[in-house]
Image: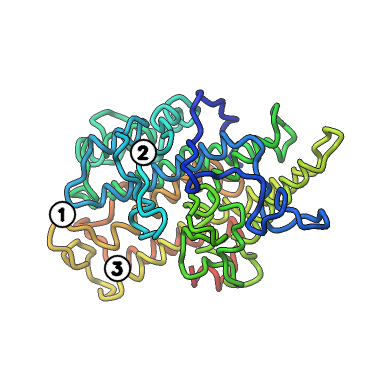
């Protein structure tokens, strides 16, 4: 079994600054206007209680905003590497816009820039933590100076991301997706790695000094608004596909309390199609709410309550990452639907006019790869050897011009799906529908 990596000890990082009503964030009421998300009778509601200390919580939101910004900018026709390096190390100019806002056409706010928040030094956050010691399997197979730095051996996440920002483009000539690897790499090496370490500590009773702050930080890394259920349909999917919305109708979209970020969004995308695997968005969010309530209601200091909720949140989150690998394996198979079984997989066969034009297949290969790398930071169900096998099957780049046929690749994808399904016991219907 894999272990959770570490209890991260923060470098001193400023929280997001209040931005009027936009990033006011950690007030004392839920969307129903009641104190700490409780109803008039004092019973717990489906709103995550307001953090009394919001530094780690809002810090996690900054990471989400910056990571998604990097991925979006790498898809530009001519990405600006200098600007992206500033976003990565937290030194971005104050007038640099945050794409999470501008790309979602929010009526209010219509724009938010880095001068209105305190950006996180993501590079230091990754390179100074234990994840810097995690070598990514098969990254030594990436072509040096094309897909990875010119250095021998396996690379860590910071080395790869910095190379992408130094050589900014959507995909390399080999079809390696820099945009996917960068955005999801940040989400893996910070949000997933740190949150799963915190949750694992709660599960095992290895508690810190301020348990509420630790729990709030894990919830911030998860990326759900405090009233996540207001965004969800009855099946657990995002209502109207809205990753940010003014759900309390106060005239502003609060990016701390009214934005849905990467991991929470994926739980809504990968919720179980059958009851066997549950509804990931509901299950994870309810575990976070119930765990926080257990902390708040403990008057003795004996925090025996949150451990089960931590285990649930941890388990559902890991299942979501694993389901993502299956989803993008399915997407790759769909990308090959116009090919005959014996046709070789090439960029031209998939409709690309050349190396500079990304294909959907490349996006999907990149996501399957990065989410498998994500599981290197924490997996209770897949062993190191199983993860290595999946990486070996995916390879270090899309299988272009290597004599790999559609039939060959579908067989490879079947092996990947089978390994993950057997480890997690996913229902056949879900595996087929993700």
Residue located at (33% from left, 36% from top): 87
Taking the spot 35% from the left edge, 46% from the top edge, the residue there is 98
Q: Is residue 75 visible?
A: yes
Q: Is residue 237 left or right of residue 343?
A: right
Query: In which image quadrant can residue 83 be found?
Result: top left
Residue drawn at x 67%, y 37% is: 52
Q: Nearer the viewer, mark 2 or mark 1?
A: 2
Q: Nearer the viewer, residue 290 or 415?
A: 290
Q: Which residue is mark 3?
A: 406
Give me the C-alpha separation between circle 2 and circle 1.
33 Å
| Residue position for label 1 | 355
Measured as percent of width and height from the top left, residue 408 is found at 32, 64
Task: Confirm whether residue 419 shows in the render.
Answer: no
What quarter of the picture does the N terminus occupy? top right
Which numbered disc, 2 or 3, marks the residue that appears first in the sequence?
A: 2
Q: In the rendered view, would you say 21 is above or below 377? A: below
Q: Position of residue 120 (x, y in %)?
A: 43, 33
Which quadrant holds residue 340?
bottom left
Q: Are marks 2 and 1 in contact (CB under 8 Å)?
A: no
Asked if 125 appears above or below 173 in the picture, the reply is above
Q: Which residue is mark 2?
A: 114
How far apart marks 2 and 3 lie (CA) works out to: 45 Å
Give SS at disc 3.
helix
On the rendered structure, is 390 left or right of 297?
A: left
Whichever of labels 1 and 3 marks the residue nearer the N terminus, that label is 1
In the displayed orientation, state which residue is furthest to the left. Answer: 353
Q: Residues within 10 Å of mark 2 (few under 14, many from 20)?
A: many
Nearer to me, 281 or 66: 66
Q: Secondary structure at mark 2?
A: helix
Q: Earlier in the sequence, mark 2 or mark 1?
A: 2
Instruction: Locate residue 103, reporting x and y percent.
Output: 33, 56
């Amino acid at each position: 079994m894999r272990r959770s990596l570490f209890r991260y000890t923060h470098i001193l990082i400023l929280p997001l600054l209040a931005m009027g009503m936009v990033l006011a964030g950690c007030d004392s009421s839920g969307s129903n206007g009641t104190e700490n998300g409780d109803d008039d009778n004092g019973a717990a509601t489906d709103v995550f209680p307001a953090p009394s200390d919001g530094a780690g919580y809002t810090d996690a939101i900054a990471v989400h905003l910056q990571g998604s910004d990097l991925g979006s900018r790498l898809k530009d026709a001519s990405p600006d590497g200098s600007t992206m390096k500033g976003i990565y190390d937290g030194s971005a100019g104050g007038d640099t816009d945050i794409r999470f806002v501008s790309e979602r056409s929010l009526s209010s706010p219509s724009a938010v820039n880095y001068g209105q928040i305190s950006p996180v030094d993501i590079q230091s956050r990754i390179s100074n933590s234990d994840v810097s010691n995690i070598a990514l399997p098969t990254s030594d197979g990436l072509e040096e100076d094309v897909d990875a730095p010119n250095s021998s051996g396996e690379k860590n996440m910071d080395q790869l991301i910095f190379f992408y920002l130094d050589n900014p483009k959507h995909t390399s000539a080999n079809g390696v997706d820099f945009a996917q690897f960068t955005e999801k790499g940040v989400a893996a090496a910070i949000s997933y790695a740190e949150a799963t370490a915190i949750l694992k500590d709660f599960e095992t009773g290895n508690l810190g000094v301020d348990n509420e702050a630790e729990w709030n930080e894990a919830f911030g890394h998860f990326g759900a608004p405090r009233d996540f259920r207001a965004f969800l349909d009855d099946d657990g999917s995002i209502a109207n596909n809205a990753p940010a919305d003014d759900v309390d109708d106060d005239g502003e979209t609060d990016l701390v309390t009214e934005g849905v970020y990467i991991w929470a969004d994926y739980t809504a995308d990968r919720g179980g199609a059958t009851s066997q695997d549950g509804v990931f968005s509901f299950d994870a969010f309810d575990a976070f709410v119930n765990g926080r309530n257990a902390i708040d209601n403990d008057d003795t200091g004996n925090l025996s309550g949150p451990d089960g909720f931590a285990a649930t949140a941890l388990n559902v989150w890991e299942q979501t990452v694993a389901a993502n690998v299956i989803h993008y394996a399915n997407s790759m198979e769909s990308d090959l639907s116009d090919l005959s079984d014996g046709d070789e997989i090439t960029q031209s066969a998939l409709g690309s006019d050349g190396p500079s034009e990304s294909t959907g297949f490349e996006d999907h290969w990149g996501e399957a790869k990065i989410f498998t790398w994500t599981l290197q930071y924490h997996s209770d169900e897949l062993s190191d050897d199983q993860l290595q096998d999946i990486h070996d099957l995916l390879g270090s780049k899309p299988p272009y011009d290597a004599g790999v046929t559609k039939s060959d690749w579908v067989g490879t994808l079947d092996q990947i799906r089978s390994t993950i399904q057997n480890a997690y016991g996913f229902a056949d219907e879900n595996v087929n529908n993700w």
